[in-house]
Image (spheres, coloured by chain):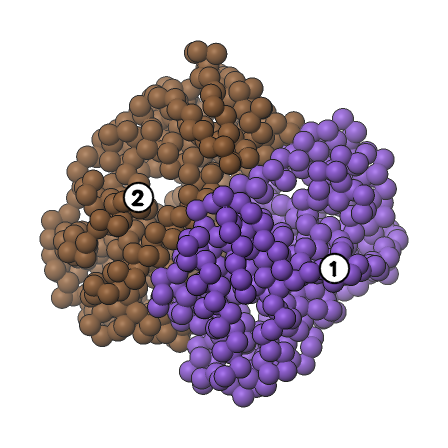
Chain colours: A brown, B purple
Amino acid sequence: MPFHSHLLANGLQIIGETSPSARSAALGFFVRTGARDETPEESGVTHFLEHMVFKGTSRRTALDVNRDFDRIGADYNAFTSEENTVFHAAVLPEYLPQAVDILADILRPSLREDDFDMEKKVILEEIGMYEDQPMWSAYDHAKRLYFAEHKLGNSILGTPESITALTRDQMYAYFQRRYVAPNIIVAAAGNFEWPRFVDLIEKHCGPWQKGAVGREGVSETRGSGRFEVLTRDKVMQEHVFLISPGPPADSPLRYAADLLGMAIGDDSGSRLYWALIDPGLADSADCSFHEYEGTGAFYTSFSCQPEQAQEDLRIVMELLHDVQKNGIREEELNQARSKVLSRVVRGSERPKGRMMALGMNWIYQHGYRSVDDELRAFEAVTLADIRQVLERYPLDQVTALALGPLAQLHAEEHG
Amino acid sequence: MQVDVYQHTFANGLTLLAERMEHVRSAAFNFLVPAGCAFDPPDQLGMGSVLADLLTRGAGPRDSRQLTFDLDNLGLDRGEGVGLMHMHLWGATVARNLPAALEIYADILRRPHLPDEELSAVKALAYQDLRALEDEPRSKVFVVLRKHLYPTPLSNDRRGTAEGIANITSEAVRRHHHRWFQPDGAILSVAGNIEWQPLRDQVERLFGDWNGSADCTLNLGPQPPRRAHVAKDLEQTQITVAYPSVPIGHPDYYAALGAVHILSSPGGMSSRLFTEIREKRGLCYAVSAGHDMLKDRANVVVYAGTTNDRAQETLDVLLAELRRLQDGIEAEEVERIQAGIKSGLIMQQESTRARASFLASDWYYLGRVRSYQEIQSAIDGLSPALILDHVRRYPPRDFVIVTLGPKPLTG
């Protein structure tokens, strides 16, 4: 599958991988901005802006945007993370020009005051929806507790207060600062013609303003190390998160970290599975490696009946200490590797999956990586690499948070 | 679009379906066994889920750990799901590992150990599944909706009840497995980079000498009351509304599907509910409608989650939108849903899991697999008049309304 790239004069990067046998073409606009790029007064603006992008331009009303996407049968959406805002669409190959026309157009939104006020209500509803999901609530609180003063602790949704206080002008200023051409990557994968695609992007995005890029506060962190219990009487199960440090996204250790996370906490055959799920001690248990610019983290979590939580926490801490001290076995590494290799192959079969990987690799690996490059990188991981991850990023140095009916829960050093 | 679909029903009644997808490197399979939660013994509700969990805790020559280890080493992503009518055992991996995975699944289906000593752990998980539902209001409201939409046992939920789980014994699990894990009526579908003849030969060797059939007749209880409210102190009120539609195979099916898409097309944002409730009024973040289908009946099911003090307004607007369907449908709306369905069908060709599940589902509902051309021409044939005629024959009314939140609503 040939790879292509082209840099527009204004700094906007275009990348693509063509695959003529694909049934569809997928494209995404990756704006390198997220919750970590917000000031405290702007909390939640990135995500709110992602919604506002769909509310129209000088050429389209909000309804036009939705109708134009639906008219070409596009599979489209957007998401906001701590570091990126991604707008994407998958379409049948013949509709790619229209998809570019819509996506490029909406990336220069009007941000009309009445749309802003209406969408504010929707954002408040979204916050309310997540509030009613204790697992998500626990994750959000745990992340904030871990990152503390670090900007990665910023909430993606913001709070009802910050959203209510936010003005259209603040959003516009943020847009002007962050949605500049050099801060945007356009990625495409699947069945499309590269030269024609570049022409289309050039035509629509060539006039976009230049501007300064980058972000403040990029540094490694090992977390606050704090332990907190949030009591919620109406929640049934106890939801517990333990976060420990990990390598940053551009570290060569990321592949080892990924496999280590899987060996500890994948949903089948992992250490946590045998320790908590198999014996029926928890209804869910997971460990996975999350990577960011400048730092990374392992998120270990479980949920269980409240009366079981203290014992489960002890089991999990013992497990993390054991892995920290003794590492994992060769067969565990190979087991995790088999799963990852199969997932990489299957994930790349859909242009949408491939487009996401292209964009994210360009951002975090600073370049192109083919499916085979990825497979080879996972193939090459050894137990020595796993040991290196553990030595540099102690897995049992946790920040922990529990949310549920319990009034207290003891971290091991006190219990 | 040319698609190679193969089918063979073995002498014992097991049907094998396969689709060859040359452009991919993976393969996915899907076993459907008539052991859905509708067939849970009435005093042991939750049995299907307990059995599903026990199935992979040792089978044939492998104990629980070895089985998991071997499946993981095949790179198999897998799951056991308990639906209303079937238990689904699915898996997906690189195509070259498919034959080895099927060998192990023959043991899981036919020779599971169902170990006595694991039953208490599995039951503990089943109880926790029930408790965890209380922390997921959106899932919870759908479970309660089913109780008011369908008569027993069609209203069963896979999680069962605490009393039902308590009553389950090892002996009962074995009986349940023996009774429902039968080849007659079971379906195995495979999609991906596979060769038909070797696949068929392998399945014949693994399952050809399996014999028996299950009696899937259900005795239905009375139709339950159409209104319910579950009181719960939450930020948002969960709203579900349902009304009768027609299932696949019915002459009105595609028009019914069209009507649902006009209300809410999967992934689309210009459909009516999203536009009127979210875009124009900002009443909620999540609003959608779907087509809930059994072999002999179907319902349109609508969902919205919204802040408590705006819940009544949301329900009012929602019901008004449902009723407004009969007033007219624009040609533009039909063109948009046609485009959405067409591209969805084609993009399905990029997912081995989606195709494997499509094959099995068509076979269960229709006893055949619809071709791309057949579906496409039915979709092309949709028009405002056709959909409107259907909506007038099956008007949105006789609503079942179930809500979850601090206060009941009127509607």
Furthest residue in direction right, as rendered:
B212
Identify the subunit bearing mark 2.
A
Q: Nearer the viewer, residue B153 or B96?
A: B153
Quadrant containing the C terminus of chain B in the rendered view: bottom right
Identify the subunit bearing mark 1.
B
Instruction: Residue A159: give its label.
Output: 2
Three-letter code for the amino acid on which mark 1 is drawn: Pro
Furthest residue in direction top, as rendered:
A414
Asked where in the image residue B149 lies, by quadrant, the reply is bottom right
Q: Residue at x 74, y 62 (%)?
A: B223
| Circle 1: element type | loop
Asked if residue B233 can be seen in this view, the reply is: yes
Q: Is residue B108 above or below residue B187?
A: above
- What is the tally of numbered marks visible in this picture? 2
Instruction: Residue B151: give its label.
Output: 1
Q: Nearer the viewer, residue B92 or B221?
A: B221
Q: Nearer the viewer, residue B180 or A7?
A: B180
Disc 1 crowd rating (10 Å Cα; few below 14, some 14-19, many 20+) is some
Where does residue A271 sit, x and y in percent of width and height?
55, 27
